[in-house]
Image (spheres, rainbow, N blue to C red):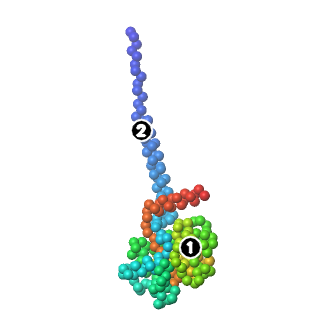
Amino acid sequence: NEAKQENPKTVEKLPMNKKKVKIIIGIIILVVLVIGIIFTYMLISSSIWEGMDETEVTVAEFEKCVTAGSCSKHNFKTFSYDEKCNYGTNNNKHPMNCVNFLGANEFCKWVGKMLPTEEQLKHYIDVGDWNTYSGSNYADEVAWYKDNSGNTTHEVGTKKSNGYGLFDMSGNVWEWTNTPSGVIFGGGYDSHDGSIQVDSRYEVAPNSIDNRIGFRCVQYHYVKYFSKRFVHKMSNFYE
């Protein structure tokens, strides 16, 4: 009798496919976890607020808020109160000064923004490029201060910007933060060069109306923040 030739048994491949699927799923989960950790670190290590105003709020911009009835006249002073106050003069492109914490806060809310936190303002002043002043190691390049201002404010945006494209982060006027107790950064037109450096911080009464103090606002841009902070951190990592 001829021996019956048996067909070889088909090897069951399903368990191997399941194993591969599990490996792939594991890799995906690991990648997601790593991305999540990096993202969480970025959120914790710096604010997710973005959209810092390029310049200090000008007199012309502030006047619109007053006209609209959203900025109270009790929270700022004019030229008639102090000749160095810009409101009520032709200095429309100069920073709005002689405004207290509440007045600055009113304006930022009116335009759908807010005063920056101390962390936000310091981050955008410092930039992380190891410069003494915001954007340069030479004060005259980026700031209006005691040695070059003629003891007055100047039109915003006329000096060199810093690494984030922001102007007058050092000098011209001190800038309010959203700290209710009253904290300002950056130095002003009558500050000496030691007071306009990237770590310049000062505490004042929130109801202070001073011709050396102004402000800028910040708005929220989630996607813009993530992309810029990621690129910034990666560039620092590879330096």
Which dot marks residue 159? 1
Q: Residue at x 50, y 79 (%)?
A: 94
Per the image, label 1 sits on a secondary structure element best described as loop
Distance from Cα at disc 2 to Cα at disc 1: 64 Å
Per the image, label 2 sits on a secondary structure element best described as helix
Residue 141 occupies which quadrant of the picture?
Answer: bottom right
Question: Can the viewer see residue 187 in this picture?
Answer: no
Which dot marks residue 189? none
Whether residue 234 is situated above or below residue 167 in the rendered picture: above
- 143 relative position to 48: left or right: right
Which dot marks residue 18? 2
Q: Which one is nearer the viewer's eye here, 162 or 34?
A: 162
Q: Which one is nearer the viewer's eye here, 1 or 43?
A: 43
Q: At which x and y percent is residue 194?
A: 62, 77
Residue 103 occupies which quadrant of the picture?
Answer: bottom left
- Label 2 crowd (10 A; few <14 / some 14-19 / many >=20): few
Labels 2, 1: front one: 1
- Label 1 crowd (10 A; few <14 / some 14-19 / many >=20): some
Q: Residue at x 45, y 51 (%)?
A: 32
- 128 relative position to 71: left or right: right
Mark 1 residue type:
Lys
Q: At which x and y percent is residue 129?
A: 59, 65
Q: For the N terminus, which image quadrant?
A: top left
Q: Residue at x 60, y 58 (%)?
A: 239
Q: At which x and y percent is residue 224?
A: 46, 62
Q: Which one is nearer the viewer's eye here, 74 or 65?
A: 65
Q: Which one is nearer the viewer's eye here, 86 or 215?
A: 86
Whether residue 94 is situated above or below residue 3 in the rendered picture: below
